[in-house]
Image (cartoon, coloured by chain):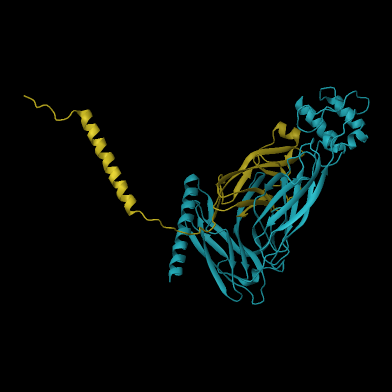
Chain colours: A yellow, B cyan
Amino acid sequence: MTRKPLFRISQWVWIVCLFGVLLAAAGGAAAIQRSVTIQAHWRVLPYQVLQFMNTDDGGTSAVYVTPEPTGLDRERGYIEDEYAFRLRVISNTSWKLQVVDASSSSTPSYIRRHGGEYVALTDDALVIASGANGSYEVGIDVRIKLVDGQPAVPAGSLNLVFTLMSL
Amino acid sequence: MCSVRKRIAFRYLSRFFFVLAVCAAGSAAVEAISVSQSEIQVVLPRGEMHSFSFELVNDEDQTLDLALRIVDWTESSDGVTTILPVGSHDRSLVEQVILHDGEVHLLPGQSAVITIEVTLDPRAEGTYWAGCLIQEMADSAVHDETSVSASRQLLIRMLYTTPDAQPSARVSDLWVSGSNPITVHAEITNDGTTALGDVACLFSAEDTEGGTVFESSVQEFSLLPGSCATVSVRAPWTTDASGMYLVRAVSDFGGDTLIAGQIVIRLDPLLLVPIGASEAVPRDLDGDGWYEDVDGDGDATFADVRLFTEFIDDSGVTGNVRAFDFDNDGRITISDVDALEQTIREAA
């Protein structure tokens, strides 16, 4: 003869739930009694991180090899490469990223933050991106003039220097 | 004792957040130079030494060679920072800074602590500044193909101010430009010896009855001694607006008082008349404030461009600059013809 269970399964579930709720309420009440209000002040120093997201295997500097000019490139007189470089900036304070052409090449090339307007690269620094605190990916587009159908950049002569600093 | 504990706790907290950020960068991708401090601003009594350290982390998978040097820098009114030869300005801090490490060789995952000491000259007055430039040594490998190489730098700006320095600034100019929209500009000049941080500027305009037409503030900015910055806001007046307005720029530069500049501008109502042999007055078909339908026939076409070109010096055009200033430079010139043609071409 089998004994009839004291409670059915569904009743056990209800009992366990009720017990849990009571336990949580009791814990909460105890926590309220024990809580105190404190004020903590600290200042976090500004820090910055700058990374290339596509680095050439040959070294620590990013190197972008210009592609062979297409028919369209020859017609319009320049090679345009979107996202020639991708940089990541992490900063806990307002920041700006400047770029300068350290090679002072005679034929101007053009640069822009992806989506912005092209500006001529010179040995004078220009602000290419800036922002508030946070993490940003900065895509850099490069436009190189063609002279006689070839890029007007002698091998290895265009050297961009990106400088990250507080705004 | 308590302040020493606080300072130690603060240093550990700062490093904790820095390491947290570096970890976040590392989890997203590799190849990063990280610096635990990007700017330092200190009030330092003359003759006392201040020492601070920052950490450089190589989070890349290859060795990193970094060159460190103390440089002079300045900032132009459009916000570009330029590295200068040492001693280029009379508030240079370079001679008063000692940098202990000129070159750092970091293996992958390695970090280095760099210490800098600063002692202000006993005759110092106001703010002196310099920067620690951290340069990635350029890759000297020669690439056969035509290539563009890029390297990185970080600039830690250091500004030291004597305790008794008093900030001073003025609104050195206030003007408007453009026709549609009209932009209001203010030039703020730091004419004191102290660097100003978090300079705020509020623009407002009132009509002749004292009612506020608009108020607009700009993002806070900083100003080195002797430098100026131009800040601008877009005014809400449309081409149809007219009347006299008092435009004011009020700036809080951190001194005991606020500084302000004001101008009165007068917007004349449009008095449109038929241009040339047209039978109707010019019309603004899309409500953008420009009267592209120069002949008033209800369509903006190349016939309007031809008519506008022919009668560009006509009083019906020059007397209504705001209606026909298609390139928004505040004047009627041949470039307005180009701008109108471009607008009609795009609409077609």
B185 or A105, which is in the foreground?
B185
Q: Report which quarter residue B190 is drawn in.
A: bottom right
Farthest-out residue, front: B209
At a point 69% along the width and 46% down the height, the residue shown is: B215
Image quadrant for the C terminus of chain B?
top right
| Residue nearest the viewer, comparing B346 with B297 | B297
Q: Position of residue B212 (x, y in %)?
A: 72, 45
Q: Residue furthest left?
A: A1
Report the front residue among B64 and B241: B241
* Residue B85 occupies quadrant: bottom right
Numbered disc total: 0
Quadrant in which the N terminus of chain B is drawn? bottom left
Q: Residue B251's x, y, as percent?
A: 69, 56
Q: Nearer the viewer, residue B165 or A70?
A: B165
Q: Is residue B28 above or below residue A93?
A: above
- Residue plotted at (78% across, 30% down): B343
Task: Please state if B21 lies on the left or on the right of B209 as rendered.
Answer: left
Residue B295 at what x, y percent from top left? Answer: 87, 25
Residue B204 in the image: state x and y as whole percent.
Answer: 72, 48
Can residue A120 be seen here?
no
Residue A89 visible in rendering = yes
